[in-house]
Image (cartoon, rainbow, N blue to C red):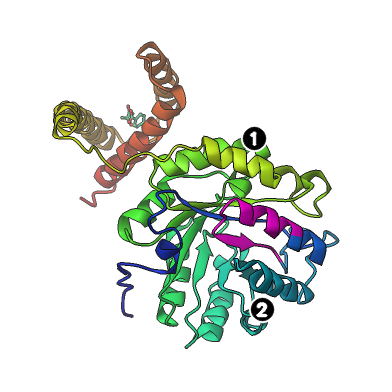
Amino acid sequence: MQLMKFNPTKSFFTELQAGQGHPLVIAGPCSAETEEQVMQTAAALKQQNVHLFRAGIWKPRTRPGSFEGVGSKGLAWLNRVKRELGMRVAIEVATARHVEEALKQEIDVLWIGARTTVNPFAVQEIADALQGVNVPVMVKNPVNPDLALWIGAIERMYHAGVTDLAAIHRGFSSYQKSKYRNVPVWQIPIELKARYQSLPMIVDPSHIGGKRDLIFPVSQKALDLGYDGMMIETHLTPDKALSDAEQQVTPDALKAILAKLQVRKTNYDDAELVNRAEELRLQIDAADHDIIAALGRRMALVEQIGEYKKLNNVQVLQLERWKEIFRSRGEWAEDAGLNHAFIEELYKLIHVESIRKQTQILDGDR
Ligand SMILES: C=C(O[C@@H]1C=C(C(=O)O)C=C[C@H]1O)C(=O)O
């Protein structure tokens, strides 16, 4: 299979915001509800120079009985937004039929939702429907934190001939309670960006946060990480919205959020500033040398205990010792002004590695 060599110098998405010096803004209601609502929302958003108007037509809902979208008739409303207001319009598609109907109504941009990205059969069906069409496509991350699945969906579009691609980070489902509706796991989109630098990355703070209050901080963090834009759900009367009421904002609130966001420089633009950062980076290099040397010493000791366990036929896992380590290192971390949870996670990784090393020694498979 040919690997994706995605490296365009410009694309539909970069052109939309070209020269404006501010990020791409995609906004519109979670769901198209009535023709009037769609037209009024779009008119309000046009005033704010929103680049792309979004609206859900077919809504995949967790449980049956919730509002599942107006269906095909909403496409004509979006077509009206396009003709009468001159805005570009985007919708979510989940099946080949959705793609065909959207193309008939000249929808400008399609996106693949998180619940579709998880399913390669569904993604391939959409890719097949897009063969030879080359309409811009945005791919949301899968609901589970799986980078390969996300890349796989983007590759299926690419192999179908779609050249205007973007990724949307909407966060990941989690069983554990969190302040987010979908935990961001920033490391995953960062890895995607590191692999495909020219792939535009768009944040969806509405789905990550699940609440209006989180839209600003999540968007700001994304911009600080170099994201190219954001998709923000906007409703004329959010509290009355038929879906996702808690996370939608009015067009005025959107305006306030956009005005407050700070777009920072991608890098230092002065030799003096570069030098100071370089000095600090040299010190970070030295600190990292120390960390790795200390880990090397620790692992050598772990191996010695492994040999000792082998000699005495003692099992690898020593639960009491491990519990004591987990507790004390957390305390040491706090004394050193470090985040407790961070050090706990670090020690979990270290412990897994210790166990791997000792298991190799005990089982003689070195
Ligand atoms: C190193 C040992 O083996 C395991 C690894 C540990 C560690 O990495 O600190 C702690 C307890 C054991 O589960 C040990 O028994 O002390």
| Foreground residue among 360 and 76 | 76
Q: Residue at x 38, y 11 (%)?
A: 335
How many numbered callouts?
2
Q: Position of residue 334 (x, y in %)?
A: 41, 15
Residue 133 vs 181, above or below: the answer is below
**Which residues make up the magenta segment?**
40-56
| Foreground residue among 35 and 94 | 35
Q: Residue at x 28, y 40 (%)?
A: 358
Q: Which mark is residue 298?
A: none
Q: Is residue 47 magenta?
A: yes
Locate residue 117 relative to residue 276 in the image: left or right: right
- Does residue 88 appear in the picture of this structure? yes
Q: CA distance from mark 1 to mark 2?
A: 33 Å
Circle 2 crowding by C-alpha within 10 Å: few under 14, some 14–19, many from 20: many
Q: Position of residue 295 (x, y in %)?
A: 22, 31
Q: Which mark is residue 213?
A: 1
Q: Position of residue 240 (x, y in %)?
A: 83, 48
Residue 226 vs 60, above or below: the answer is above
Q: Label 2 near label 1: C-beta < 8 Å?
A: no
Sequence order check: which comes first, mark 1 or mark 2?
A: 2
- What residue is shown with label 2? 98
| Foreground residue among 284 and 198 | 198
